Amino acid sequence: MNIVVCVKYVPDASGEVAFESDNTVDRTATDGLLSELDEYAVEQALQVKEKREDEEVTVTALCVGPEKAADAVRKALQMGADQGVHVLDDAIAGSDAAATSLVLAEAVKKAGPADLVMCGMASTDGGMSVVPAMLAERLGLPQVTFASVLETQGDQVRIKRDGDVATEVVGATMPVVVSVTDQTGEARYPSFKGIMAAKKKPVETYSLADLGVEPSQVGLSVAWSAVEETTARPPRTAGEVVPDEDGAGAQALADFLASKKFI
Amino acid sequence: MSEVLVLVDHVDGAVRKPTFELLTIARRLGEPSAVFIGAADQAAAAAESLGKYGAEKVYAVDDAQIRGYLVAPKAEALQQVAGQVSPAAILISSTAEGKEVAGRLAVKLESGLITDATDVQAGEGGPVTTQSVFAGNYTVTAKVTQGTPIITVKPNSATPEEVAGAAAVSEVAVTVSDAAKTAQIIASQPRQATGRPELTEAAIVVSGGRGTGGNFEPVEQLADSLGAAVGASRAAVDSGWVPHTYQVGQTGKTVSPQLYVAAGISGAIQHRAGMQTSKTIIAVNKDEEAPIFELVDFGVVGDLHAVLPALTEKVTARKG
Ligand SMILES: Cc1cc2nc3c(=O)[nH]c(=O)nc-3n(C[C@H](O)[C@H](O)[C@H](O)COP(=O)(O)OP(=O)(O)OC[C@H]3O[C@@H](n4cnc5c(N)ncnc54)[C@H](O)[C@@H]3O)c2cc1C
Ligand SMILES: Nc1ncnc2c1ncn2[C@@H]1O[C@H](COP(=O)(O)O)[C@@H](O)[C@H]1O
């Protein structure tokens, strides 16, 4: 069985984010890391592997991103993935979700065939939550997305999905595209042994040419949408903070709410 | 005038409020047409409410063959309706499912997709959207540059305006591939009605965190006195005190109400990501150093178990 986990390299959310003059995210301004939300996908992939102990299961971490994005692949290997694929090509810079999903789809085909394609619920930077659905569309696969619980048995996949109006159990037959939420449970930390072992694990680097994708199909210039203007939100000016001495807090709050016409 | 397609978000034919907001936005861009994917016998009732908010046409797609499958069939159906009417834009609610339908549709139509818009205005050469990005730290405006603009819009992005539309129903027969019918909804448990406003639609949200110690009563009672929705931090959700649907933040709901009340919530970056575009923010926290106080318009350093009930009493007294 083959599992491909899509892991994204994102700017550290605790650092400052900045835009370049072409309105793309400046990915050099802050250090990057494996998107926290993709760690849950790696964790679930490893759990599937562990549960299928009498089967050969290979977990491949796949990342589309710049040179430094190899860090994200390495982190997944340290956690326990078996091998890595890094799609690296200057032409990819500035790609939108549509182009990213195209590159991911071709990379999955080349690295695969995959029985399970796993994703996080959203990237912590772009955060559109659409790449898994687009990937499923491009691969012609069922999508079982936003899983808060994931179970596999034989070639069957079942998830629990907390929708807006209902909680659903969704099932499909492999191969499938899965995305998992942070409700699936904490991701493991790499152990010392894992960190050492990761150094020997194979990582393949693909270029667009390796995938049969034309440079003209990706990148900022062919993005299907364009950011026109970016404005930093003015910092909130800290308001008044009062202590609740002798129960005065509730009165102060009530006065504030009344002054703002909430009551 | 070109048609603008609005995918109707509904539960058994009962149209949800964000759809009326989409119709209001659609009128800025062209002639609003609703696409109703649902049971054939519910289309008429849905059309009646859609007409009140300006829908001129209602394309009714009978979902008898596709009910019980996730996302993909809806994208195929919408693709076929779009193929027939060549719309100026397609508007969809920014729910998890809405965004996924939009994602698949964008690939099918080779069209640009913008998600989570908080405003959409007509511009030269197509709609111009406003989005709030990076945990609400930036506002960006954007435009679709290829194909039919597909835009998912967050709840509360427009005030629904009542205006009569013809809401002429035409049934559209779609053919959905077997490939789209592969992710099957095996069981579905509808969310229990709380009697409170929807979290993402509410004008006021009162949220509780770990500081409640598991007793959400003061939070709920304050919410009820204000007619507010109840929210929570992930710590409160992870402790099992409230359902995940209450969670505000990066991996929960993004809310942008007129008033947000954070009680017993420290204000971690992932929580802020879901609430910091709220118009007015107040907090009650025992710890004067809590980062949430950096965001507030008004804050009280104190025990929420004392402050909230006292406030509820005052609110009720003032209202009554
Ligand atoms: C990938 C990821 C995603 C996440 N997504 C989210 C998300 O979507 N939403 C979210 O909220 N969090 C999210 N988190 C978690 C987030 O980092 C924080 O851990 C969480 O928000 C903390 O919740 P809290 O403020 O309730 O708890 P704490 O940080 O423990 O704060 C509790 C606060 O209550 C105060 N307090 C205690 N007792 C009282 C009292 N009696 N009266 C008044 N105040 C009191 C304390 O002073 C303290 O400030 C995410 C984390 C990760 C890693
Ligand atoms: N460049 C990328 N490389 C690898 N995986 C990605 C990339 N972009 C998105 N993904 C996957 O798609 C998921 C959702 O991304 P998004 O639609 O951008 O929110 C992420 O959690 C990843 O699993």
Image (cartoon, rainbow, N blue to C red):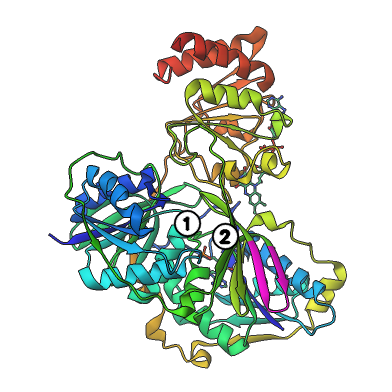
Q: Is residue B280 above or below residue A109?
A: above
Residue B214 x %, y %: 72, 32
Describe the element under mark 1 as helix, strand or loop.
loop
Amino acid on which disc 1 is placed: Ala
Q: Which quadrant of the figure has residue A61?
A: bottom right
Residue bearing mark 1: A18
Q: Which quadrant of the figure has residue B175?
A: bottom left
Residue A152 included in the magenta stretch of the image: yes
**Label 2 with label 1: CB-CB less than 8 Å:** yes
Q: Quadrant of the C terminus of chain A?
A: top left
Q: Is residue B238 left or right of residue B197?
A: right
Residue B103 included in the magenta stretch of the image: no
Quick one: A97 or B200, which is closer to the camera? B200
Residue bearing mark 2: A30
* Crowd band around label 1 with a 10 angstrom C-alpha radius: few (<14), some (14–19), many (20+): some
Chain of the residue under label 2 = A
**Which one is earlier in the sequence, the residue at label 2 or at label 1?**
1
Q: Which residues are magenta?
A: A150-159
